[in-house]
Image: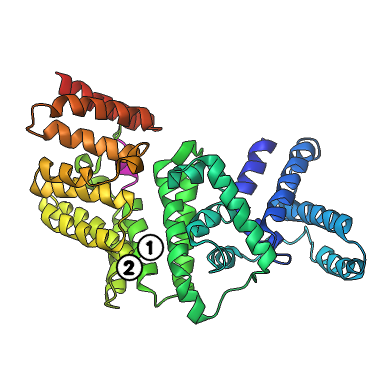
Amino acid sequence: MATQSIEHAVRESYGRLVAILSARDRDIAAAEDALADAIVAALESWPDQGIPDQPEAWLVAVARRRLVDRARRKATGTAVAHSLAVLTELSAEVDPAIPHFPDERLKLLFVCAHPAIDPSMHAALMLQSVLGLDAARIAAAFVISPDAMARRLTRAKVKIRDAGIGFELPDQRDLAGRLAPVLDAIYTAYGSGWEGLAGDARPDDLASEAIWLGRMLNELLPDQPEALGLLALMLHLEARRAARRKPDGGYAPLADQDPARWSSQFLNEAEATLRRAGRFGQTGRYQLEAAIQSAHVGRRLTGAPDMATIASLYDALFRHAPVLGVAVARATATAEADGAEAGLRLLDEIEPARVAAYQPYWAARAELLARADAPEARDEALLAYERAIDLSNDPAIRAHLATRRVRLLS
């Protein structure tokens, strides 16, 4: 029970605690280490002494003492007086009786998006520092090795510390300039929760956290159409969460979902948010992705989505964001509008090295090959199904693909 309470406190509060602990010295790695020490201390003491009334405050107090101890050990020479003064002030801030801390996660998001940090690391750094994902899960999202991701994350944290990057919101001019990587990180976090990336025990929490950050971002920047577009996109996807599984637990792809199981509350909010974004007349990636989801939802009224419109939207989206996931989805949409061969041609344009371990590519390729007329397509489809099954972590999706493969064999 105590272990579960510790996990809950950390899972719910990780980003807030790291932001609080790292705000003064701008050392995210040290804050994470101190928080890890506090978690160990909790595991040792809570089972015997009981869970404190305010577990988050307890963790912050212990972590801050660890930071104080480490800083004292490092303080030497002329730096001693200054260091002790800072430590005294830091210690005075600890009040375990305070039930709630200010939420600093949005500040930390924009710190991680600072232009002094390698742009390719912005989103990954936010996922770890703000949402607590480990390097392995982040690496899976970016399709690189966990070791390489861990090294890059370490370098990015050292950069924040050594460059003295301030833990405060930038002014309005700089704020908008850092928006894109913040949006990317929030969306990647949502996708991790949506897919249950790399065995996340509670993916719904991560998806809900991403939506919460999206709402907070729009309160901070109400005139940013892409922030509105991202929120609309996540709400559209969240509306279909329950329908992704059949009553027996089996996987239900979008085309097979029962629209009656989609959440009208989320869909109505998504559509209203997308309309607000559209009033700015500044089309961007997330607005286009939300528009695609909106077009799929049209099936509630017509019985079938307008695949020609969806394929056209994917063409526009690919021009804005020619990333791997968009390229695969575009090929699938094109196949629905213009035939399997047209979709396969787009899949063939993707560099093979990029898709070697990308499960959605092999699942899409298998489906399109199964529908193609070429004599050799059937054997290729069977191999693609095998690859997609091997790369899938979701048992329900594995079972769905296996069923499709058996159907092709028969």
**Whole-percent x and y of residue 140?**
46, 42
Residue 79 visible in the snapshot = yes
| Quadrant position of the C terminus in the picture | top left
> Disc count in the image?
2
Q: Quadrant of residue 340?
A: top left
Where 390 falls versus 306 (above or below)?
above
Closest to the observer, 116 or 139:
116
Name the residue type under label 1. Leu
Classify 10 Å Cα crowding around label 2: few (below 14), some (14-19), many (20 and above).
Answer: many
- State how far apart marks 1 and 2 are (Cα): 7 Å
Asked if the stretch drawn in magenta spans residue 145, the answer is no
3 left or right, relative to 338: right
Q: Quadrant where the N terminus lies?
A: top right
Reply above or below: 142 against 114.
Answer: above
Image height check: is 359 above or below 399? below
Q: Earlier in the sequence, mark 1 or mark 2?
A: 1
Question: Do the residues under discs 1 and 2 have CB atoms within 8 angstroms?
Answer: yes
Checking the image for residue 231, the label placed there is 1
Magenta range: 239-245
x 79%, y 62%: residue? 94
Query: Foreground residue, 312 or 97?
Result: 312
Numbered circle sitting on residue 273: 2
Residue 187 placement, left or right of 148: left
Is 208 placed above or below 203 here? below
Regarding residue 13, the answer to whether it shows in the image is no
Image location of residue 389, percent across then percent down: 32, 28
User: Residue 284: x, y in percent?
Assistant: 31, 68
x, y percentage for residue 90?
A: 81, 65
